[in-house]
Image (cartoon, rainbow, N blue to C red):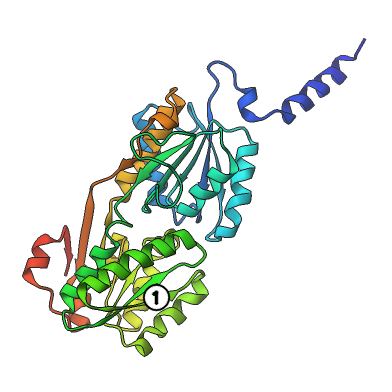
Amino acid sequence: MIGRRRLIRLLGGVAAALPLRALAQPGARPVIGYLGAESPVLFASRLKAFHTGLATLGFTEGRNLAIEYRWAEGDNERLPALASELVGRGIAVLATPGSLAAALAAKRATGTIPVVFETGADPIATGLVTGMRQPGGNVTGVTSLNAAVGGKRLELLHELLPNARRFALLVNPSNPKNAEASTADLQVAARTLGCELHVVTASAESELDGAFAGLNKLQVGGLVIANETFFANRSDQLAALARRYAIAAVHQSREFAVAGGLMSYGGSVAESHGQAGIYVGRILKGEKPGDLPVVQVTKVEMVVNVKTAKALGITVPLTMLGRADEVIE
């Protein structure tokens, strides 16, 4: 015979050792993992969109859904361990919105748990999936046009600065696949425009000032900031540096132009992260990730800060102002 208290302790120990999925009972709240490359504060707008997408499928955190979060705080080297930690929790779905590095870490961490990504990079070229229509395997998600329109950002700068023959591209070397893809795309665009492209790098906040300071020595006409999670969540800092060093710069995030940067051009965060939430909801309802085609969002927004343009001595053509989704006076 075994004592009642001892039996309870024994059963409790067994339960604690089981993964969350194994503890799930009919009607129990599913548990998903959310792997963020930054912090909850920097991801606030993206989290809001993601939760809105989940709500579209009837899932609300705390009511009928539990979410385990892991944040890399801007350090991509932490992502593999954090992904493995979430996988070990036996989650039903692993979501990696807003970071190619997080998506790749998740794919390496599991070949069975569904992974839903959101990235501006090409999912096929970066090895996330083998096909857009039928990704197969356990990975699917959403791609914005942020990487695809990298060359367009350079074209817009050239339109504003037609006499400039040198431009720069800022990339994050700690996200090598993204940095390599961004560089290759802009090199093609630069050759088409008959311009030189210089690549500058920064992978930590402490390196950003030096990257901007070095642009004057390169005598570039303007700067394209690559599609990159690390940069997307530091729009205010980047805009402040662009103003300090009088750099004509274009970035993916609207927040950059609002904060005083010259221009932003990129895909809609609300649309892409909301769609990632929808895909997580569809998988929770029983659909297989390999059967869900990778979604490519189509909404692209251009914001021009005319006040900043005047401070830089740049006259924005009326044709560009007419194409802009928003003009900041």
* Foreground residue among 234 and 191: 191
Give percent across and percent down for residue 254.
28, 60
Quick check: 8 left or right of 152? right
Quick check: 39 left or right of 159? right
Q: Name the residue under label 1.
A: 199
Give percent across and percent down for residue 182.
37, 63
Q: In which quarter of the image is the N terminus?
A: top right
Look at the numbered disc 1 and give the secondary structure of its residue: strand
Is 276 located above or below residue 286 in the figure? below
Residue 290 visible? The answer is yes
Quick check: 160 left or right of 55? left
Please identify the quarter of the rendering in which residue 18 is found.
top right
Is 329 located above or below residue 213 in the figure? above
Give percent across and percent down for residue 12.
77, 24
Residue 36 visible? The answer is no
Query: Which residue is outermost to the bottom?
Result: 217
Q: In which quarter of the image is the C terminus?
A: bottom left
The residue shown at (35%, 35%) is 293
Query: Which residue is outermost to the top?
Result: 1
Q: Tag count in the figure?
A: 1
Give percent across and percent down for residue 226.
36, 65
The residue shown at (56%, 61%) is 75
